[in-house]
Image: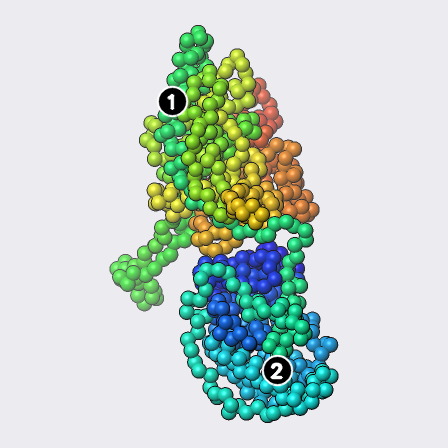
Amino acid sequence: MLTQVNYEVKGQLAKLLATEDLIIENRKVSTASFDVERRVLTLPMWEKASGTVYDLLVGHEVGHALYTPADNWMSDYPDVPPSYVNVLEDVRIEKLMKIKYAGLTKTFYNGYSQLAEQDFFELESHDIDDMGLADRINIHYKIGNFEDVSFTTDEQWFVDQAFKTNTFREVLELAQKLYEHIKDEQEQLIKFDELEFSKGNEGSSGQGMPFQPSDMDSDIEMEGDTGEDGEAGQGEPTDIDSNLQEDLDFASDDPTGGLHGGVEEAVTDKALQDNLENLNKKDNGSFYEPEYVELPDLNLDTLVAKNNDVHEYLDHFWTASQRKFDEEATNSKNIFEKVDNDYRLFRRSAQKEVNYMVKEFECRKSADAYARATVAKTGVLDCTKLHSYKYNEDLFKKITVLPDGKNHGLVFVLDWSGSMSTVLMDTIKQLFNLIWFCKKVQIPFKVYAFTNEWNHYSEWDQPDEYSWRPRKNIPEHHQEKDRRVCVGREFSMVEFLSSDCKKSDLEKQLLSIWRLSTALSSYYRWNVKVMFQAPRRLNLSGTPLNEALVSLNQIIPQFKKATGVQKVQCVTLTDGEAHPLSYNKWFSFKESERDYMGTRSTMNGSVFIRDTHNGKTYSCNSNQHELTSALLNQLRGRFPDVNFIGIRVLDGREANSFIRRYMDWDFDKVQRIQSIWKKDKSIKLENVGYHAYFGLSSHALGNDTEFTVKEDATKSQIKSAFKKSLNGKKMNKKVLSQFMDFIA
């Protein structure tokens, strides 16, 4: 049974065979179809097919996509059974595909071998020699290596001409002649002995009036192949095999019993199509068809809250807060002094750690450059070595070439949700260390917080205003289009920090963010006596992580263009699973004759995200974390020069479920990772969407790392305190150290 990964692989195979970036869609359909204008190849979900048979079917359908036009030929050849055209067209397109890709010869051979073994042509209950000429041609070219098929001299002409056809027009003309030949034979047999005909055509198809090849042109007139000029079709999806057989139902309903103008259809062709349909993925009671959705083109002007606007808003609020405290005769000065002093103390204590990391980074970078260095001869004589010419052949000067390393940048995406309040300050400390490190080694950076609050509420609010006035007429971030992922207008990426700022401005902004984090931390947030509040527009909200990942498709290119960096480290920090996403969809109701644009959750049914830049698709599945992983895989596919690092803050209760979820409930893997977690209170998972996904203990994240002991401490006490300090420092360096490893 094929998995969803297999569908992705087979889709890539179809693209390679088509030598163009076709859009491949796997759907619960009975047969393949191809939209010529949109270049969309729809393939049935052949769930029960083996890998070889699947490759055969993909190669066959791509052949139709490349060479079979979407023209309505039936008006020009009304009498020709569609199955005759399909049989002869299959011969042509498979011949062309084998010529274009020699390796497909083996694939077709092995694939048809398996189909023959499973009696897909339903030959076990039939004598091949008693079958019509169209059926025997079909068997000869598809499974003739495994079944003996005989032809008369007259019939052999048709067999040979089928292989000689080069255009679809030639196929149609040959099908017309095949139809006339079979019809003439049947009429002669009826005239000769009507009774024998009623017994089942026991006579050979070669009986009756002899067929003379001279009655028709020896060579079929060559015409341009309308299937190869790219002009066939007008954008509507056309069935590939069934469009050649759309009258088969009519034929089967014919009172004569499966006749087309008195001529039998090719029963083996219909048998093959019916049995291939049984390979398709069944609905299993699911209401939804597989949906292929695309990411929207977001307007960053509405989506991103600019750095200047954010801090202008914060400055206004802090000024108003101080004024409010002063008016009420509260000790506002002491409140702000305490918070600001805490920041200065932390900044001073962090410098040693940051400087150490900078030094370590420079050492790692130098070691890496040395490892990549090459030594080459210059062609210039080294005069200091001339005296040794008798025993030394190396007399030329050498030069050491140090290849330039790539310049790096950092995009930090911070979870600004309500559950972060307990670890927010510890997170901000880690972030500030990272920012100071980047500043010292001159790495450009941007820090965004994702939230649903900034756009939702009024532009300016006062410290005592808890009316929380929602904004009206919030602009949309993107146009509503059918099958486009939705990013709600309330969502924002708030640009907290940027390397573009002057040193003095950056210092002021860091202090402001420290104040904000303090106000949002648990103690200050709920302590009525202190009431050190945060502005409403920057309050904590839900967890729109998925929307943030979608927005990175526009943010990362903009960041690279503005900074000129070659390599980007994108670090995402969160403490929970993301909200689901929805997508726009047109709904039609025949009863009311009313169409409207609605939304549907990506959690309902089989939804695939299609990246229009590379044509790849990513399955969302039905779990929240799998949608996030799909979005990350899409980002990795589009931006191969970006490292995506995830940091997940976990408490003790979440850790085990988190590990089981991302280890796909594999018992051995779960046990191994859990043992690491118990020991280190941190884990590292690889290739689960992120290149590296770190789980950090929420308790260990905020451990005090200061090395303090009593004056009369014993050696063992000093040792224990030092070890504790080192363990704390090790935890607090997790983010910075990993980032350094990636860019060194």
> Residue 247: horizontal and vertical position, in percent?
59, 69
Q: Secondary structure at mark 2?
A: helix
Looking at the image, is mark 2 or mark 1 nearer the viewer?
Answer: 2
Residue at coordinates 66% horizontally, 59% vertically from top-left? 1
In the drawing, does residue 515 fall left or right of residue 148? left
In the drawing, does residue 89 fall left or right of residue 675? left
Q: Taking the image as drawn, is residue 684 in sight?
A: no
Q: Local crowd at mark 1 within 10 Å, few (<14), some, or many (≥20)?
A: some
Residue at coordinates 65% horizontally, 79% vertically from top-left? 146
Residue at coordinates 40% horizontally, 16% vertically from top-left? 320
Q: Quadrant of the C terminus?
A: top left
> Where does label 2 land, which residue?
133
Figure quadrant of residue 522: top right
Mark 1 belongs to which amino acid?
Answer: Asp
Figure quadrant of residue 19: bottom left
Q: In this rendering, is residue 652 above or below 146? A: above
Q: Taking the image as drawn, is residue 475 in sight?
A: yes
Image disc number at residue 733: none
In the drawing, does residue 487 fall left or right of residue 307? right
Q: In this rendering, is residue 643 above or below 120? A: above
Residue at coordinates 35% horizontally, 42% vertically from top-left? 563
Q: Reading the chain from its start, which is encountered first: label 2 or label 1?
A: 2
> Residue 498: horizontal and vertical position, in percent?
38, 34
Q: Nearer the viewer, residue 465 or 390?
A: 465
Mark 2 belongs to which amino acid?
Answer: Leu
Q: Secondary structure at mark 1?
A: helix
> Residue 401: horizontal and vertical position, in percent?
34, 54
> Residue 145: horizontal and vertical position, in percent?
63, 80
Q: Residue furthest top?
A: 329
Image disc number at residue 315: 1
CA separation, marks 2 and 1?
87 Å
Counting the numbered discs, the total is 2
